Amino acid sequence: MLIAVLISYLSLLCFPQSFFRWSVTSAHLTLYSDSSFPPEEGKKILELVEAKLAASPLFSPQMHHSIFICNARWRRLVLFNRQYRVGGVNYYPLTSNVFLRDAVIGENRLVSQSGNVVQGDRTLDYFITHELAHTITKKAAGWYRHLNLPEYVSEGYPDYVAKGNSFDYEKAKQAFLSEAPEMDRWGSGLYLRYHFLVAYLLDKKKQSVQELFENPMEQKAVEDEIRAEVQVGNIQSPPSISLAESQNCTPQHPESP
Ligand SMILES: [Zn+2]
């Protein structure tokens, strides 16, 4: 009996299409919802998601992904299971289907637990891309290796893919160095710290994505390295002395530090 229930539940996760009446497809992605939405609005979101995913070397055009927007509470209770409160869930390698909580597709926004739309740079296409990036990283790294990755890699890389060009590296670096509240993963609920560390390794240190997954540095080692580089940079570039200061004159328009 228990096995029959389990098999039925796993089948539901793998083939939930009959519970989602509305859908639209664009290239390698299909967006399903349990509420009606204008197909052209859904397509726009899928195009944003596909562009972000295609920028990752792990993206494969051979793979099709399905995204299910769960507006009804009961669908979230059933399909999200123990992760009921999160924005989205990914069950790969069981299935490449991903499930997102309620959303306003026309506004490209996810609805948070409070009932308000999530504001800022975490748009609906960001949340969808983040979940699908979990699929492509699990597929590339292999399930077992992925399970043993440091969290800053397993969550940081999906965020790196999902934020796309909206990520401001220098702003994140300042927030990291000043230990700003948004860099506290558990306090803020954001992956900004992890994203910043991954961006440092890939964009500044020019590590390959393969290296990141095959031989990841410990989180503390990456953070220590960044802080050490900043210190060396400060020593090598002391504040410049203006001509007026060197002549012991009072500058008329002193520059801010
Ligand atoms: Zn995630």
Image (cartoon, helix red, strand yellow):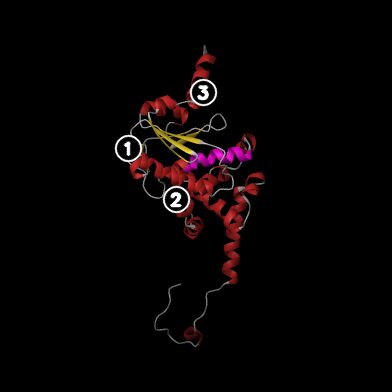
Furthest residue toward right: 215
> Which mark is nearer the camera, 3 or 2?
3
Q: Position of residue 116 (x, y in %)?
A: 32, 41
Q: Residues within 10 Å of mark 1 (few under 14, many from 20)?
A: few
Reading the chain from its start, which is encountered first: label 3 or label 2? 3
Q: Which residue is mark 3?
A: 10
Residue 182, label in figure? 2
Viewed as shown, does residue 116 lie left or right of 143? left
Q: Amino acid at mark 2?
A: Glu
Residue 71, label in figure? none
Residues marked 2 and 1 touching at CB (< 8 Å): no
Reading the chain from its start, which is encountered first: label 1 or label 3? 3
Does residue 189 appear anywhere in the picture?
no
> Can residue 136 be found in the magenta stretch?
yes
Q: CA distance from mark 2 to mark 1?
A: 22 Å
Q: Amino acid at mark 3?
A: Leu
- Figure quadrant of residue 100: top left
The stretch in magenta equals 129-141
| Residue drawn at 51 percent across, 80 percent down | 241
Secondary structure type for disc 2: helix
Reading the chain from its start, which is encountered first: label 2 or label 1? 1
Viewed as shown, does residue 37 lie left or right of 90? left
